[in-house]
Amino acid sequence: MKRLSKVLLSLFFVLVLVGCGNMSSTPTKKVEEFLSKYQSMDSDVLAQLDKVISDDGSMNDKQKKKYRSLLEKQYQNLSYKVKDENIDGDNATVEVEIEVLDYATAQAEAKKYYEEHKDEFKDNDKSDSLVEDAEESIDKVTSYIDYKLKQLENVKDKTKYNITFNLEKDNGKWKVMDLSDEDIQKIHGLYGV
């Protein structure tokens, strides 16, 4: 009887291990793995972040460094809840609600303040002359970018967004498809700006 119990117990553990192995390749687990790379600041995520920031011509090096640290803070504070999973053959969708720092509101308020107080913002890169009214010039005003980064640095409030992750099965493994720019903005807390 003891021997049968040991065999059944061993069989149970084998089934649990096999089951767990299969569970790690579900669409939901793939999305959780994807989001955890942001939370743990995986080297691939940071490499992408560095590329995007280095390609930005509107910020100086000091501002780029501050912006990078703000996005790292965003990634570390990201939380999520999986709401639904739908599988249709080799395609799947996973509905997720994420919660992130509300950088969008802070950025919108900074822009509004700039528009109402342009005389306070001098373009340090152009001999302190006042910036003209042109819309495209706002992102080139060093003092405005400094102000906006300071506002983002002070953000404590969070906001929630819904993201639908699309996945495809490739060689028996689920793969998260590329996110839209909208969804990336949601992860960064900048959606709607």
Image (cartoon, helix red, strand yellow):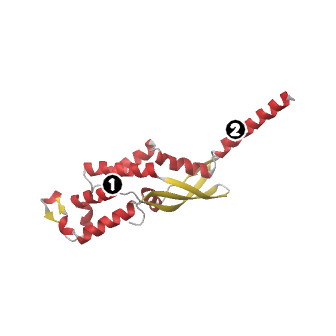
* Residue at 60% in and 54% down: 168
Point out which mark residue 17 bears.
2
Position of residue 34 in the picture relative to residue 15 (left or right):
left
Q: Residue at x 32, y 66 (%)?
A: 109
Where is residue 159? Give x, y as percent: 45, 61
Label tally: 2
| Relative side of 37 to 49, left or right | right
Q: Residue furthest right?
A: 1
Badge 2 element: helix
Q: In this image, 144 relative to 10: left or right?
A: left
Residue 106 lies, in percent from the top left, at 35, 62
Tell whether 172 sits left or right of 178. Answer: right
Q: Closer to the camera: disc 1 or disc 2?
A: 1
Q: Is residue 2 above or below residue 28?
A: above
Question: Which residue of the protein is positioned furthest toward the front in this rendering?
Answer: 156
> Label 2 amino acid?
Leu
**In the rendered view of the protein, which quadrant contains the N terminus?**
top right
Q: CA distance from mark 1 to mark 2?
A: 45 Å
- In what element is the residue under mark 1? helix
Task: State the image coordinates of residue 42 (x, y, percent, origin top left).
Answer: 46, 43
- The crowd level at tag 1 (other Cα within 10 Å; few <14, some 14-19, many 20+) is some
Residue 148: quarter of image = bottom left
Circle 1 is placed at which residue position? 153
Residue at point 24% right, 72% down? Answer: 116
Question: Amino acid under label 1?
Answer: Glu
N-term-proximal mark, 1 vs 2 = 2
Residue 64: x and y in percent read: 30, 50
10 Å neighbourhood of mark 2: few (<14), some, or many (≥20)?
Answer: few
Residue 110 found in image quarter:
bottom left
Is any part of residue 76 visible from this angle? yes
